[in-house]
Structures are given as C-alpha cells and as structure tokens.
Image (spheres, grey):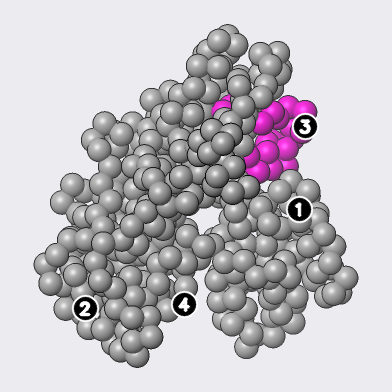
C-alpha cells in the first residue's frame, strides 16, 4: 500500500510501528535508539590492540562482563563470562571496580546497576542492545493486566513471577506485588514458592519458560495454562478462563529460541543418528517435549563438559555459544551442531561488537563516562526486593 493510499484511508501508524521504524523513541522500552559518539571503523586492524591498551590503562577501575551469547571478538576481553544473573552478581562482588562494562543487553545492565553499589557505574557499549522478549511486556501493559485480574476477582490470589529477562520496571512491579524473579535454572523453585503464597501465578514475560516449567517440572496440564495477550481486550481471555487457570502466561517469547521447531528436532535426528538433542527451556513446549535434555545456558555448558568423547549433540540455543562450544570440544571428538539448519544469532546481543567496545573503553580511559545505565531509586528498591526473594528461595 502506498503512502498516498494510506493517507486517503486516514491510516495512522501506531507508536510501536514508529518505534520499529526508528522514528520514535520509548524511554521505558528495552530497545535503545541511538549510540552517541564516533565509533572506530570495523575494518580497523588495530581494534584488538586498542581494546587491550585501553583496558590495561583502566586497570582495576574497569570490570568487563561477557554474556555467553556475545561474539568471540568481544568475549575475549571479558573478565568473567556467564548468564545474565551470574554476571550481575559477579559485578556486585567487585566493589573496587568503578566501571562495570556489561557486554550483553539492556535488562542485564539494569540488573547489574540494581545489585551494585551507588559508587559503581554500569555501562552498556551500545544503547541499541535491547531484548525483544523484555520489550514484549511494558509497565503500562502489566499494570493494565493487573486491573483485568482485579476485575475478575482473582488479583489477591495471583503471585507474579518474572523471568530475569525483563526490564527493571517489570521486576519492580513483581516486587511491589509480592512476587519473585526467576532464572531458567531456578524457575521450578520459584514457582513452587509462588504457589505456597497464592493459588495462581502470573508469569512474565516468556510464556514458554513458564509453560515448560509448570507442565514438565510441576506436573500441571496444558489446560492449567492460559496465555494473556496484552494486545487484545482483557488479554483475550474471559473472567472464567482466568479464574480456572493456575498459570497465567504472558504472551512473550525469545526471538532466537522461538525459531526452533519440532521439524528441527526430527530433521536432526534423521541427519545424525544417535544425536542427543539438548535445548533451552525458552523453546516451544513441543520442542522441549521432543528433546533428550532441557536446561539453562549453564546447564548446557556443564552437560557438554561431562559428555563422553565421540558423543553427538544438537543444541537449541543461541548460535554464538553453540559455535564456541563446538570449537572448544572438537579436540575431544564431541560433535556439536546447531539444532536448526537456519543460522540465527541474537541480533541485539550482536550489536555489542568490537568497535563499540573499543569506543567505550577508550572513552572511559580518557575520563569520559558514556552510555551509563542507571535505574531510578524507587524502581531499584522494588526490583531489588523481588531479586532478594529469589536469592532467598530454598
């Protein structure tokens, strides 16, 4: 449809459409829109040397965190690697570091800011490194959902459980309403705790992790779960459906893990006889049900470390990590392949590249603070409360 035709029909683009087109900014969104400063050319052959020199100049003043899904060119400069929560805790354990450079995405940097001291400054090399899953639940949408639950007469029975992969606003909402945060490693413990506090759970923002944990680990049925769609009136659910449900799942998902399908599993089994299929619990339920092993990023790494030589593995998680693990264990004759035939990196994780890291480190070395991620005090207080409940899980 042409611009002229849309004008004739008086069609107005939505705020979300404008945001996706880069014509609007949402300060409460995970998605950044710009990164000020002049970046070095990605073809600069001295990038590695420049990053090393700037990091050495900063010394103990800087602590670089690298998420498992980062590019190899970036991860080589990380002081520690891990998943989002492990890295945030690692940052909090280094109070002498003035600058925490988080090579990950926005919600991770927020979590690090929440858990570190006021004297420490958390920096994200590229402000556009957001998270599509975290973007799928805004504070306004979740507040409206709570109103729907209140009108249905069940809000007092509902305990919110939010995945670590959520914005600080969503973590704060969770803390304010008596809920807890979870990771893919402790989701089962978090849900067991939540059902001791109330009769129902509102699980944010990844429907697949919530469904897989409830059905696979807690023994619920798929009928115990309903999906709340924030883009439909009342979430697309009736009051009766909400009252009957045990798990109210937010309609969100990971853009990478959501790509894997049952066809992917069947295809790899045909291509590689005897292959072990190992997937992340953010995958769809039918993929998790068909897999041999299911677990968090840390679980995947440990499973491959313990795997016998000569074993074959198809991994359903982000490609940077899968490729790194394949290279790491090649000498042990472990065959490790990506579960899907289609190559799929996490596009927002990949925004953190070597030019952005060099620009960040050189700016800090020159005394210029760039791209600081700072959570306001009220949001931080309630988000920290939710995180502390997670830390206290049995």
Is 79 drawn above or below residue 160 in the view shown?
below
Is residue 217 inside the magenta stretch?
yes
User: Considering only order in the chain, which callout, 4 or 3, is on the residue closer to the N terminus?
Assistant: 4
Per the image, label 4 sits on a secondary structure element best described as helix
How far separated are the C-alphas under marks 1 and 3?
16 Å
User: Which label belongs to residue 118?
Assistant: none
Asked whether residue 320 appears in the rendered view, the answer is yes
Residue visible at 75% across and 77% down in the picture:
311
Front residue (pair 268, 125)? 125
Q: CB atoms at circles 3 and 4 under 8 Å apart?
A: no
In the rendered image, which quarter is residue 82 located in? bottom left
The nearer-to-camera label among 3 and 2 is 2
Between tags 3 and 4, which lies in front? 4
- Seen at 11% across and 67% down, the residue is 367
For label 2, the residue is 54
Q: Earlier in the sequence, mark 1 or mark 3?
A: 3
> Circle 1 is placed at which residue position?
287
When the figure is inspected, residue 187 is found, relative to residue 66, above or below; the finding is: above
- The stretch in magenta equals 201-227
Which comes sooner in the sequence, label 2 or label 4?
2
Q: Is residue 389 visible?
A: no
Compare marks 3 and 2 and give the one earlier in the sequence.
2
Tell me which residue sits at (16%, 72%) in the image: 365
> In the drawing, what numbered circle is on residue 221?
3
């Amino acid at each position: 449809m042409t611009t002229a035709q849309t004008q004739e029909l008086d069609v107005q683009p939505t705020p979300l459409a404008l945001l996706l087109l880069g014509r609007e900014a949402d300060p409460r969104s995970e998605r950044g829109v710009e990164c000020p400063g002049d970046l070095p050319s990605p073809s600069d052959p001295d990038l590695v040397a420049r990053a090393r020199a700037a990091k050495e100049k900063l010394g103990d003043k800087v602590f670089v965190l690298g998420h498992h899904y980062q590019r190899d060119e970036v991860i080589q400069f990380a002081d520690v690697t891990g998943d989002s929560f492990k890295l945030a805790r690692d940052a909090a354990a280094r109070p002498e570091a003035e600058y925490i450079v988080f090579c990950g995405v926005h919600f991770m940097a927020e979590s690090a800011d929440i858990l570190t001291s006021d004297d420490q400054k958390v920096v994200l090399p590229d402000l556009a490194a957001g998270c599509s899953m975290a973007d799928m639940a805004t504070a306004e949408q979740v507040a409206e959902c709570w109103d729907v639950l209140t009108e249905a007469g069940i809000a007092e029975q509902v305990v919110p459980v939010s995945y670590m992969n959520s914005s600080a606003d969503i973590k704060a909402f969770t803390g304010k309403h008596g809920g807890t945060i979870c990771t893919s490693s402790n989701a089962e413990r978090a849900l067991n705790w939540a059902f001791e506090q109330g009769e129902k759970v509102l699980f944010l923002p990844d429907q697949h992790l919530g469904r897989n944990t409830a059905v696979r680990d807690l023994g619920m049925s798929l009928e115990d779960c309903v999906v709340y769609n924030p883009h439909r009136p009342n979430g697309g659910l009736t009051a009766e459906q909400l009252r009957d449900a045990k798990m109210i799942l937010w309609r969100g998902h990971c853009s990478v893990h959501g790509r894997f399908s049952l066809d992917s599993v069947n295809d790899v089994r045909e291509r590689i006889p005897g292959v072990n299929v190992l997937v992340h619990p953010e995958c769809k339920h039918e993929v998790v049900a068909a897999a041999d092993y299911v677990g968090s990023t840390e679980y995947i790494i440990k499973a491959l470390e313990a795997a016998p030589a000569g074993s074959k593995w198809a991994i359903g998680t982000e490609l940077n990590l899968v490729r790194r693990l394949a290279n790491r264990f090649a000498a042990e004759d472990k065959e490790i392949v990506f579960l899907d035939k289609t190559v799929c990196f996490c596009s927002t994780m990949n925004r953190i590249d070597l030019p952005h890291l060099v620009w960040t480190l050189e700016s800090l070395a020159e005394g210029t603070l760039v791209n600081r991620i700072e959570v306001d005090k009220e949001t931080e207080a309630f988000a920290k409360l939710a995180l502390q409940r997670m830390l206290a899980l049995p």
